[in-house]
Amino acid sequence: MRPPEGRRAIEVPPQLRRYIGLDAEPQWIYTDEVNAFVWPGPDLRPAQWISQRPIVENTCVLGALPEDWFNLVKNHFLESYKLDRMRLTKRTS
């Protein structure tokens, strides 16, 4: 499902979805919102609930992203901030 109109997001490429064990459905990273929470805390879930990779058992980490794609996402976040389109969502109560 595509992000709602007006939201800033980048689609996770199919090859990267496969690599980190996500399903084949389109996945998006919203780049106009950041979450604030206590690390570690109740807002973290084991990664195995979204990934089939055996390496993610008993951790919330899926693994490192390719540097070029990570930089693309990071720059998209920075652009959202410069456009005053960034919002902070507190997740830990």
Image (cartoon, rainbow, N blue to C red):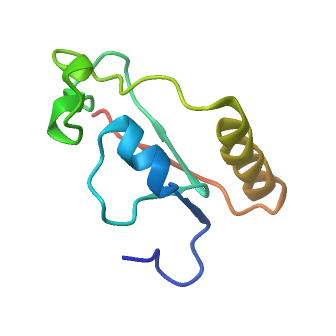
Residue 69 lies in quadrant = top right
Residue furthest to the right: 82
Percent coordinates x, y for residue 58 in the rendering: 16, 15
Query: Residue at left 58%, top 63%?
Result: 9
Q: Is residue 65 above or below residue 5?
A: above
Residue 3, x across and y down, in percent: 46, 74
Residue 16 visible in the picture = yes
State the residue at coordinates (15%, 38%).
49
Looking at the rendered image, the quarter that the N terminus falls into is: bottom left
Residue 45 in sight from this viewpoint = no
Seen in the picture, residue 82 relative to 39 is either above or below; the reply is below
Q: Is residue 7 above or below residue 31?
A: below
Q: Identify the residue at image location x=66%, y=46%.
A: 73
How far across and how far down the image is residue 19, in percent?
Answer: 40, 38
The quadrant of the image that shows the C terminus is: top left
| Total numbered labels | 0
Residue 66: name its quadrant: top right
* Residue toward you, 7 or 1: 1
Q: Is residue 62 left or right of residue 65?
A: left
